[in-house]
């Protein structure tokens, strides 16, 4: 469809907004009562995420698309680290930025393969550029042919120069995602010469910082970077917000942290002790011997908890841990649902027997 579509003159290039489909002239009549866009340019075809409506099922296929700032940062970082191939798992914006540059710049050497649950992208890319894929169960909808496309992409140049970049739905189970990522890594290890047996495929997993412990449970070699990833179509995860409204989305990676250079002009700095770039508000704690902040604000050390905590938290002697000042203590005995008194449950409440 795409190959036939690009051969059409500009005046005959239409996109049906209701069906989310590129239309060939023979299909116009069938879509005559639908809303459609006309004169679809080559630039628009190179940016399908701008044409397609984002999917909005938060748990399985929520599409929050990278802001240009974050997308450009990721691509610059990938190029700076010397990678030549990107396995883009659920990152259509990054994939289309790579594809667009590859088609316009002769000396641009980076290539990308997009694995995504959104089948609509198949009309914009060839079978060597897109695989319809479910990241929650490692399922290739295209069967063995699609699986082989992915394997060949990973195994080019004996597996050298490739990185996986993934931005899965935040509502998805970390365990299921980790299982699929490990299977993709296993495909990469099957590169023939056995040089990767003790290594992991380089990876950027983009996910909220509050999942850090879960990710490290499955990938102990990973560490979290301070870079705040922003999205175009998410009300809260946008650049420029301050305090608690800053994006909680971070990059988890198995690369050496000191290799991940964050932009100084955006307020990041290098901590010589931690040997990694951190946000400007992330001050090094001499007691913890680490830059401990997760959310960009300066955290404070609690001597009783023996760790740094959020600035809005205070130590609660009842709970024996730090929490918000107006929290409900976990150790407080819950009263009866009927009379509110402690010491008994609703089923044995004296008030019920009197009634």
Image: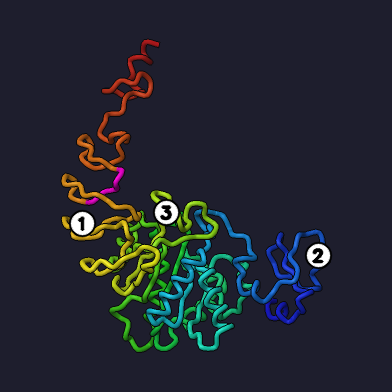
Q: Nearer the viewer, residue 25 or 96?
A: 96
Q: Which mark is residue 30?
A: 2
- Residue 287, compared with residue 6, is above or below; it is above
Q: Is residue 19 left or right of residue 59?
A: right
- Residue at mark 3: 246
- Whether residue 236 appears in magenta in the rendering, the answer is no
Q: Secondary structure at mark 2?
A: helix
- Residue at mark 1: 285
Task: Residue 82 in the image: state x and y as whole percent.
Answer: 39, 82
Gap in angstroms between the C-alphas marked 3 and 2: 46 Å
Residue 8, by quadrant, is bottom right
Q: Nearer the viewer, residue 301 or 5?
A: 301
- Residue 45, compared with residue 195, is above or below; it is above
Tell me where the magenta segment starts and ends, as one range. 308-312
Q: Nearer the viewer, residue 196 or 319?
A: 319
Q: Residue at x 35, y 89 (%)?
A: 193
Q: Residue at x 39, y 67 (%)?
A: 265
Task: Residue 99 in the image: state x and y as whole percent.
Answer: 55, 78
Q: Residue at x 77, y 79 (%)?
A: 9
Residue 284, by quadrant, is bottom left
- Residue 299, compared with residue 259, is above or below; it is above
Task: Residue 289 in the image: state x and y as whole percent.
Answer: 18, 60
Mark 1 Cα-neighbour bin, 10 Å: few <14, some 14–19, many ≥20: some
Classified by dominant secondary structure, the portion drawn in magenta counts as: loop
Mark before the other along the chain sequence, 3 or 1 = 3
State how the image is colored: rainbow
Gap in angstroms between the C-alphas marked 3 and 1: 22 Å
């Amino acid at each position: 469809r795409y190959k036939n579509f690009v051969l059409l003159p500009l005046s005959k290039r239409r996109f049906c907004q209701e069906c989310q489909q590129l239309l060939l002239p023979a299909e116009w009549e069938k879509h005559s009562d639908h809303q459609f866009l006309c004169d679809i340019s080559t630039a628009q075809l190179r940016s399908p995420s701008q044409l397609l409506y984002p999917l909005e099922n938060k748990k399985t296929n929520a599409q929050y698309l990278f802001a240009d700032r974050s997308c450009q940062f990721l691509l610059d970082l990938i190029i700076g680290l010397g990678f030549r191939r990107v396995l883009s798992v659920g990152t259509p914006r990054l994939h289309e930025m790579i594809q667009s540059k590859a088609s316009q710049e002769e000396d641009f050497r980076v290539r990308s393969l997009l694995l995504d649950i959104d089948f609509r992208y198949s009309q914009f890319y060839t079978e060597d550029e897109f695989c319809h894929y479910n990241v929650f169960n490692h399922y290739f909808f295209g069967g063995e042919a699609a699986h082989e496309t992915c394997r060949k992409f990973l195994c080019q140049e004996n597996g050298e120069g490739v990185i996986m970049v993934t931005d899965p739905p935040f509502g998805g189970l970390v365990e299921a995602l980790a299982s699929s990522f490990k299977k993709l890594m296993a495909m990469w290890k099957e590169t023939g010469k056995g040089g990767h047996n003790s290594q992991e495929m380089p990876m950027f997993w983009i996910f909220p910082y509050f999942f850090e412990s879960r990710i490290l449970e499955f990938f102990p070699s990973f560490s979290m970077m301070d870079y705040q990833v922003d999205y175009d179509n998410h009300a809260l995860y946008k650049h420029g917000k301050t305090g608690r409204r800053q994006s909680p989305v971070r990059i988890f990676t198995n690369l050496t942290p000191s290799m991940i250079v964050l932009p100084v002009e955006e307020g990041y700095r290098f901590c010589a002790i931690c040997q990694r770039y951190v946000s400007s508000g992330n001050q090094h704690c001499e007691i913890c011997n680490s830059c401990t902040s997760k959310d960009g604000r300066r955290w404070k050390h609690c001597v009783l908890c023996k760790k740094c905590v959020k600035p809005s938290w205070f130590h609660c002697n009842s709970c024996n841990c730090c929490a918000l000042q107006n929290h409900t203590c976990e150790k407080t005995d819950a009263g009866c649902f009927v009379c509110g008194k402690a010491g008994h449950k609703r089923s044995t409440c004296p008030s019920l027997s009197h009634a």
